[in-house]
Amino acid sequence: MRHILVLTATSSVGLMALFLVDLADLYFLSLLGEVEVAAAIGYAGSILFFTVSVGIGLSIAASALVARALGERIISKARRFTTHSLLFAASISLLIAIVVWIFVPELLELLGAEGHTHKLAASYLRIIIPAMPILAMGICASAILRALGDAKRSMYVTLAGGITNAVLDPLFIFTFGLGVDGAAWASVIARFSVFGVGLYGLIKHHRALSKPKPHAFTNDALVISRIAFPAILTNIATPIGNAYVTYAIAAFGDSAVAGWAIIGRIIPFAFAGIFSLSGAIGPVIGQNLGARLYQRVKQSLGNALLFTAVYTLIAWILLAALSSQIVTLFDMSGEAANLIELFCFWLSPFFVFFGAMYVTNAAFNNLGRAHYSTIFNWGRATLGTIPFVYLGGLYFGPIGTIGGNMTGALFFGVASVIVCYRLIRRIELQDQAADVPSLPQTIRRIPLWPFSTPRG
């Protein structure tokens, strides 16, 4: 548990800074006094969530391949994959950015944006979307630094983006009088700072880049794509489910969408520890699995789920206590205020089931069953979202829409935990049946590098 807490805490610092600035971004815009502004950010956020998820999927492939090459002690291969992963991320994200940029108005219409709100959201996205390749390379650089064992500089990457955005937001929004467009330009510059700090760490401190080779890039792109595309497919399930919730709640007006937009910013900040845990627990499970220490695999999973439950309880208490202040802070009223208070008081504890899915997804990836993650993510985003959100909205209005979204996660969260434990047991029995000799006890007691300092 101590090991899990240390890894999670290190990762949380950068994430919380990034999510706090995202929350501050919406706060500054709320000071403009237009509910359409908050609603516009809500619509735009659903589309940006998709683009960021693509970047995260690409970073999973980059991290896995670089880490594997380092494990093989082939430094030239690690440098090659670092370089080609960044180029691959830039290429794929550029193609997606072009398509999204062209169809921004249509995508916003699909989500239900209309009138002035649609105009504000479209302007915001048209500024930010071209910087998608920069952000994707920055996310990959951060993941590669983590694969290199440099958690500190990986944290600096996200901190750089957060600090840049926090400084420039009020300057661009109020001093320059750019409003929503100012927030967009601040985010664009922040994305360049993310990439710049990540690239500096890779080049200056690790000399991790090599000269690109066209023929080698073609071969590596195939290897990268085998990991990246399934990871992207898994990651985009969540923003697609989120987009449906936005579409459903749009029927109840801009005030409801504004409330949902603020809830969408509260969630990642309040539950940053759980998001960080999902990235930290994977290597712990993977290393114990490699050592065939199945009891420790189950113990790691159990500790992660316990952490999720305790963290959610603490977050729930704080959100409930601060619900009125949150409504006042963002100057919300009417339907928006009702939704925020409902979430803080009654729906936030349901996030424990989302957390359980994040933990089991990481476990499935390291247990060699990545397709399980895809199945559960898409199941939650479709069967666990659409009917619950639709019926909730039909009978209880916007409150039922958000309540249905949170309730649907319950079934898939519980099911994913059951399947994960059964999978561990099945792998253990298969190993025993194969009669594979276990590691000597003297080796089994030594903590595995790179999560501890090797001796000798």
Image (cartoon, grey):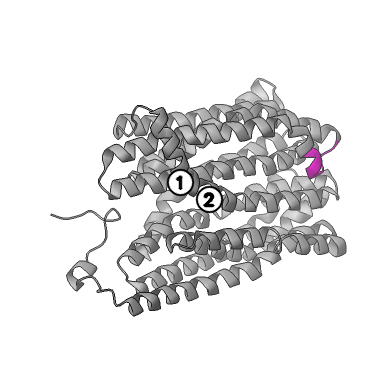
Task: Report the span colored magenta.
Answer: 108-114
Q: Is residue 159 above or below residue 429?
A: above
Query: Sequence-wise, which precedes: disc 2 or disc 1?
Result: 1
SS state under label 1: helix
Kind of residue at badge 2: Ala
Give 331 or 137, whichever is nearer the viewer.
137
Taking the spot 66% from the left edge, 20% from the top edge, the residue there is: 176
Question: What quarter of the picture does the N terminus occupy?
Answer: bottom left
Q: Position of residue 16 (x, y in %)?
A: 51, 47
The answer to whether residue 102 shows anywhere in this view is: yes
Q: Position of residue 435 (x, y in %)?
A: 29, 78
Marks 2 & 1, CB-CB < 8 Å contact: yes
Give 71 or 142, whichever is nearer the viewer.
71
Left or right placement of residue 106 versus residue 350 in this view? right
Q: Is residue 212 above or below residue 309?
A: above
Q: Is residue 296 above or below residue 39?
A: below
Q: Which residue is mark 1?
A: 61
Kind of residue at badge 1: Ala
